[in-house]
Amino acid sequence: MIKSSDLKLISYLRKNSRQTLTEISKLTRIPISTLYDKLKVHEHSVILKHTTLLDFARLGFNCRANILLKGSKEDRDKLGSYLKAHPAVNNLYKINNGYDYLVEGVFIHVKDLEDFMEELEKAFALNEKKTHYVIEDLKREEFVPEAVA
């Protein structure tokens, strides 16, 4: 079980990862050296990656889609490897309930998405596929575990 003080640090970093340890120390009354030690312990275990959320549309990527894929048993692993390596795949999840993968793809145009789907159909035996276009982000990466009192 994770300690309350560790959870406090993680919660503050989750809300604003650019906040300094000095600022977090003032808010939590946990010494900076302790926060630093906790951060080092949790990096690459609980804290998997420090990253930046992007507004893809402002960068010229106007098409985002969540794609559900079910491949043949023979192609399933090859499909997963292909998707992991593809530059347009932002997130990839292995899922259940009738599908193998949930893919979040980011494309400049809808045509690029259609070309991607055609590539998949030519290269792999897909049993099922569904595409859901992302119209608007309503909430993204907001979950913050609450520190236990």
Image: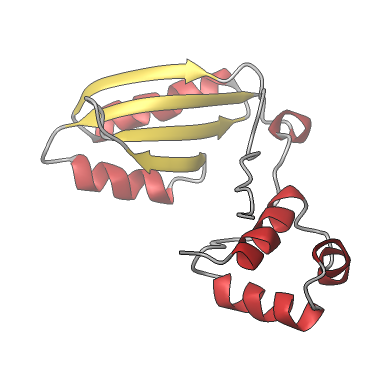
Q: Nearer the viewer, residue 108 or 38?
A: 38
Residue 119 in the image: state x and y as whole percent.
35, 31
In screen coordinates, is 84 left or right of 24? Answer: left
Residue 128 in the image: state x and y as whole percent.
24, 20
Q: Quadrant of residue 41?
A: bottom right
Quadrant into which the C terminus falls:
bottom right
Q: Nearer the viewer, residue 143 or 122?
A: 143
**What residue do we see at 77% from left, 72% from top?**
30
Quadrant into which the N terminus falls:
bottom left
As displayed, is residue 83 above or below residue 105? Answer: below
**What residue do we see at 65% from left, 73% from top?**
39
Q: Residue furthest left?
A: 74
Count of labels shown?
0
Q: Nearer the viewer, residue 146 or 54?
A: 146
Q: Quadrant of residue 74?
A: top left
Q: Nearer the viewer, residue 63 or 116?
A: 63
In screen coordinates, is 49 left or right of 70? Answer: right
Residue 5 in the image: state x and y as whole percent.
66, 66
In screen coordinates, is 129 left or right of 140? Answer: left
Residue 100 in the image: state x and y as whole percent.
26, 34
**What residue do we see at 58% from left, 30% from top?**
107
**What residue do we see at 27% from left, 42% from top?**
79
Q: Quadrant of residue 68?
A: top left
In screen coordinates, is 12 left or right of 69? Answer: right
As displayed, is residue 112 above or below residue 12? Answer: above
Q: Residue furthest front?
A: 149
